[in-house]
Amino acid sequence: MPEGLEAEIWRDALTAIVGRRIAAAWVDERVAPPDLPDRVRGERIEAVDRIGKVVVVATTGPRVGLHFGMTGRLVVDGTAPIECLAYASGQDHPDWDRLRLVTDPSVGPAPAVRMNDPRRLGRITLDPDLSALGPDALTVGVHDLRQALSGRRAPVKAVLLDQGAVAGLGNLCVDEVLWWAGIDPRRPADTLGDAQVRVLAGVIRRRLSVMLRRGGSTTGELDPEVRATRPTCPLDGAQLRRETVGGRTTVWCPVHQT
């Protein structure tokens, strides 16, 4: 399930194509504008950026937005920076490609970029409007987080999953940072005091950086195996709980998360 951390790994991998010219392009028109190949052909790739879970490839023409959905992934110059997503099949069929970019110069026989998505839940856009996204999770500050939570009666987990509040947090990362911060995911967001907001902002920055170095959103203490087996909490020995909060499966500790 790609989150902002996976998108950052792909953004970093895509820096290899900056400066190249797009010689040819192909898209699955079910998830992308049909005129995209004509719009980008011959354009030079100037920069690659990321906002939340969206990677943006800026060309001398349009900007191309890559939205990965639940099972989208990138292959760059024939190499997958993330071999397999958690909860995905681990296979890579050409029929699952949704975008292919061939660049000049090329590196090897494969397209320079392939976006592969078996469930076809991702999408590719031209000149995406990302103005509705909140501050990015990797750099969110105390002031930004306080504004995002202020006046929100929804569970804090649901608010953190709202990309308009904080961009880039997904289900696994939200559970992870709330666990480290000792905050009950069911708690109304606007009941967090200033001290808790400061703690949460610091945890988000620190823990996401650690998980990014480890390889992504599945590398936290509440990894997929822990989520499936629900062992005792490593911090206090209590039995971890799994329930639905904000419409999403949530794993948390009923003792130290208050």
Image (tube, grey):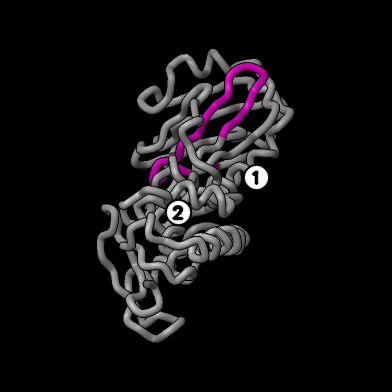
Q: Where does residue 218 sit, x and y in percent of width and height?
A: 47, 61
Image quarter hosting the C terminus: bottom left
Residue at mark 2 to residue at mark 1: CA–CA distance: 17 Å
Label 1 crowding class (10 Å Cα cut-off): few <14, some 14-19, many 20+? some
Q: Is residue 48 above or below residue 125?
A: below
Q: Nearer the viewer, mark 2 or mark 1?
A: 1
Proximity of marks 2 and 1: CB atoms separated by less than 8 Å = no
Instruction: Say if the magenta span includes residue 71.
Output: yes
Instruction: Say if the magenta span includes residue 132.
Output: no
Q: Where does residue 160 sit, x and y in percent of width and height?
A: 42, 52
Residue appearing at x 42%, y 49% in the figure:
150
For label 2, the residue is: 85
Residue positioned most to the bottom? 237
Range shown magenta: 56-74
Instruction: Determine which quarter of the picture holds residue 209.
Output: bottom right
Residue appearing at x 37%, y 82% in the figure:
232
Give the residue type that dot 2 points to. Answer: Leu
Q: Is residue 1 visible?
A: no
Residue appearing at x 47%, y 71% in the figure:
221
Q: Is residue 25 above or below residue 123?
A: above
Give the residue type that dot 1 points to. Answer: Asp
Q: Where does residue 216 sit, x and y in percent of width and height?
A: 53, 57
For label 1, the residue is: 12
